[in-house]
Amino acid sequence: MKIVFWTVSHLPDLGGFQWSTFRLAEALKKLGHEVLFLTATAQDSNHDDIVEAVRITASNIPEWTTKSGGWLLENVNRFDIIHSIDLFYRAIGEQLDFLNRSGLPSIIKIPTMGCIPRLITSQSLKCQLGKIDAIIALSDGIKSELLAAGVESERIYPIPNGVPCDKFVPLQNKGVVKRTLGFAESDVLILYAGRLVGRKRVDVLLKASQRLVGEAKVILLGSGFDMRDSTEKEMLDLARSIPNVSIVGVQENTLAYYQTSDIHILLSEREGQPNSILEGMSCALPTVATNIHGISNLVTDGIEGMLVDVGDVDATVSALKKLVHNPELRSVMGKAGRERALHQFEIGIIADQYAELYRNLIRKRKGERK
């Protein structure tokens, strides 16, 4: 099969859903399929030798959608299926129009909750969205939003994100690598990996960290706080003032931090399906996370980790302390997470599911033409 991923950006270091898309494309290539990214990203990527990219530059999203959609229609005979990543926000109507005009089976992946009710606001957009062959819902919450927008249930597919479990593997002896990252072998490390933004509720993590001084150290790994946002600036100031918090920012070798940490944490108020939890599970890290759509279908409370309510600092501290002071519990939960990642979320398994979906949609379209 020949698959085109239509996405504003595919550079994996720019965010979670770009990473998951790149990993899927790489896994599909290993299965023998041809994959191309049609993207707005102007600069070359060091991943271009793995997955081909066509880069179309524009000054804004509507202009890019027009230009890239035109390219799609001109090159439609090169592909068997179009896989669109996310909605193009300021050009959704044109995006859906191009997909429906292409004549090819089309898929849209919805990476997070909240965008459907916020963006699909008119009856016209609902009708256009309802014509898309398949929409990927990463959680039950996203599926509910799609159903409320009038999308037929048979067009909604709950295919999860995947993780390369052969890369994200646990270390038997973390002490040596801890030292290379500037920590003591005896330090218990709690890892936050993700964008440092308000909806991730880093503020709750920082308040919990203050109550763990002398017991554990907290690593903040990811793109930094927005200094134009007063709330995020306050979070940065607080983070800098807490002695057991290390802000390491964006790192090329994120794997080293997963492999040397002891606990993974994510306290978001909303998510699609966070790659950081899958990566932590694959590295046998127990997870402390919020009990929300997109997380609760990855982590079972008391099995792979512990779930807490959004914004609950006391519950977060309690869960962390149980894990910090109980290495055996960390080991049991970490092993459970690793097993679940291997059997449910390994990227090869996910690529097989997508390949089967693509084949079915192509057969269906061909049947309709007869």
Image: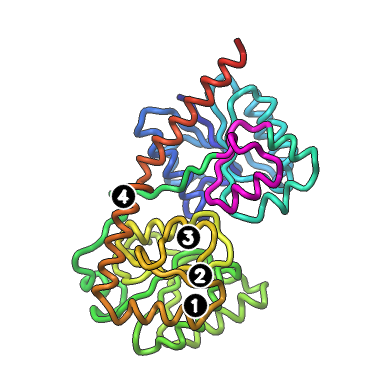
Give the number of the disc on residue 137: none
Pointers 2 and 3 in contact (CB under 8 A)?
no
Residue 149 point in image, percent of width and height? 71, 44
Which residue is denoted by mark 2 in the rendering?
267
Quarter the N terminus occupies? top left
Q: Amino acid at mark 3?
A: Ser
Q: Which residues are magenta?
A: 131-156
In reply to whether residue 257 is colored magenta, the answer given is: no
Residue 59 appears in the picture as rendered: no
Residue 16 appears in the picture as rendered: yes
Give the number of the disc on residue 296: 3
- 150 left or right of 270? right
Which residue is denoted by mark 1 in the rendering?
205
Nearest to N terminus: mark 2 or mark 3? 2
Q: CA distance from mark 2 to mark 4?
A: 24 Å
Q: CA distance from mark 2 to mark 3?
A: 12 Å
Q: CA distance from mark 1 to mark 2?
A: 7 Å
Seen at 47% across and 25% down, the residue is 359
Q: Amino acid at mark 4?
A: Leu
Residue 265 point in image, percent of width and height? 43, 70
